[in-house]
Image (cartoon, grey):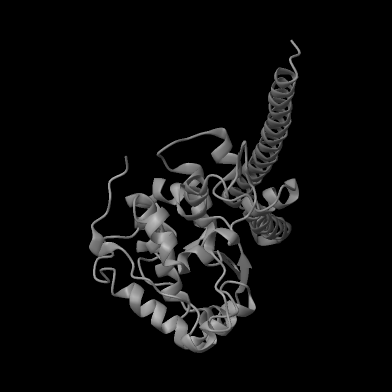
Amino acid sequence: MAEQLPARKRLPPISPISPRKAASTTTIPAVNSLPAVIFRQDFTVRPQKSPTDYLDLDLKTPRLNDIHQHLWLAGRPTAARPLHKQKQLGRSLMITEDPDEHLVWLETQLFVKPLPQYLLDHNWWVKHLCEKEDLYRSACGFLFSYVWLVCYPCDLDIAKDTGLLPHDICWLDWVRFIETFLDSIDLGILSNMNKRYQYGELRLSRLNSIYRFIPPAYSLRRFIRGYRLGSTWYAAYFGGYFRWLLVVFAILSVALSALQVGLATSNLQNNRGFGDASYGFTVAALFFIVVCVAVVLFFWLILFCYHLLSSWRDNRKKSRAWRGEIGLS
C-alpha cells in the first residue's frame, strides 16, 4: 500500500465558485469532467473506471524525471513567466494533454496543459491524490506551475480565453484558491513537489538533444524520435538537423570562388605555396561534400528501415492479438 502523507499536507476544501453564485450554480463533480477513454501508444485507459491509472498519465512526468540531472541544459531553475509575458515574447499558447510537454517551448510556441477540473475539487484530493506520495507531489507541482502562469487578472483572462482554466472562475475565486494552496506547501524548498517543477520553461530543441545523446538509456527509438517528434516528414527531420550544412556549403562555395579568382591573378599564379594550399583545400572540400551526402543518405536509410520495420512489427502484433481473440491458430 502506498505511504500515506501526513494530514498537514492535505489541502483544505475550496471551491472555484464564489459564494454569491453558489445558490444558482451547481459545481460539476470532478469525475464528470474525466474523458471516457484515453489511447496512449499500446494501451488504453478508461478514466471513469480506473481513475488512478488515468491520474498517473495525466499528472506524472516520467520522461523529465529520468533526465532531471540534465535539465539545467534546457532551462533555468526559476519560475516560468506569466501568460501575459509569454504573449509579449510573441509566443502562441499550444494546448497539450501530456504533462511531460507542459511548459516546454519551441521558437514561438509554448506548450501548456489545461488545469484539470479535479484539482479544484477538495474531495478528489482526499480520495485519489493524498494517499500516494508520488501522485500528490506531481499534482502539487502541476498546480504550482499555474501559480507562475496566472499572476494577474490579465493572465486569468488569457487562461480562460485559451481554455486553460474554466470560464466560471473569477479573479477573487482564483486568489482565494491560490492562497489556500500556498498555505499548504513549503515555498522555500518546494519539498512536497515533483522535482520536475524545480525548473520552469524548458527548451524543446535541447530536450531533444538530451534525450538522443545523453544517458540514462540509449535506443534507436529515442535517437530517431527524440523527446518530442515534431513532424513525420523526412524533409522536416533533415531540415532541423542538417540545416547547418547549407551554411557550411555556402562558406565553402565562397572560399573556393576566392581561391579560383586568386589563381587567375598574375601575382598568385606563380606562387607555389598558394597553389598547393588551393589544391589541398579543394580536395578537402570535395571530400567533405561526399561524406556529408553519404551521411544524409545513411540517415535516410536508417529512418526508412526503422519506420518500415516498426509498421511491420505493430501490424504483426495486432494481427496476432486479433487471431488469438477469435481463436484462430
Question: Residue at 32% of width from left, 51% of height from top?
Answer: 133
Q: Quadrant of residue 193?
A: bottom left
Q: Position of residue 89 (x, y in %)?
A: 56, 79
Q: Give the total of numbered labels.
A: 0
Where is residue 84 shown, x and y percent of the image?
Answer: 53, 83
Measured as percent of width and height from the top left, residue 292 is found at: 66, 42
> To which quarter of the image does residue 109 belong?
bottom right
Q: Please state which of residues 226 and 300 is positioned toward the viewer in this rendering.
A: 226
Image quarter hosting the N terminus = top left
Task: Decide if residue 12 is on the left or right side of residue 204.
Answer: left
> Where 292 falls versus 100 (above or below)?
above
Q: Is residue 116 visible?
A: no
Q: Residue at x 54, y 40 (%)?
A: 222
Q: Residue furthest top?
A: 329
State which quarter of the image contains the C terminus: top right
Q: Nearer the viewer, residue 256 or 194?
A: 194
Does residue 174 lie above or below 125 as drawn? Answer: below
Locate residue 208, reporting x and y percent.
Answer: 53, 51
The foreground one among 290 and 320 is 320
Q: Is residue 40 visible to the viewer in this orientation of the structure?
A: yes
Position of residue 163 relative to residue 293, above or below, is: below
Residue 313 sits above or below residue 285 on the image:
above
> For the point 71% across and 61% down, which residue is it?
265
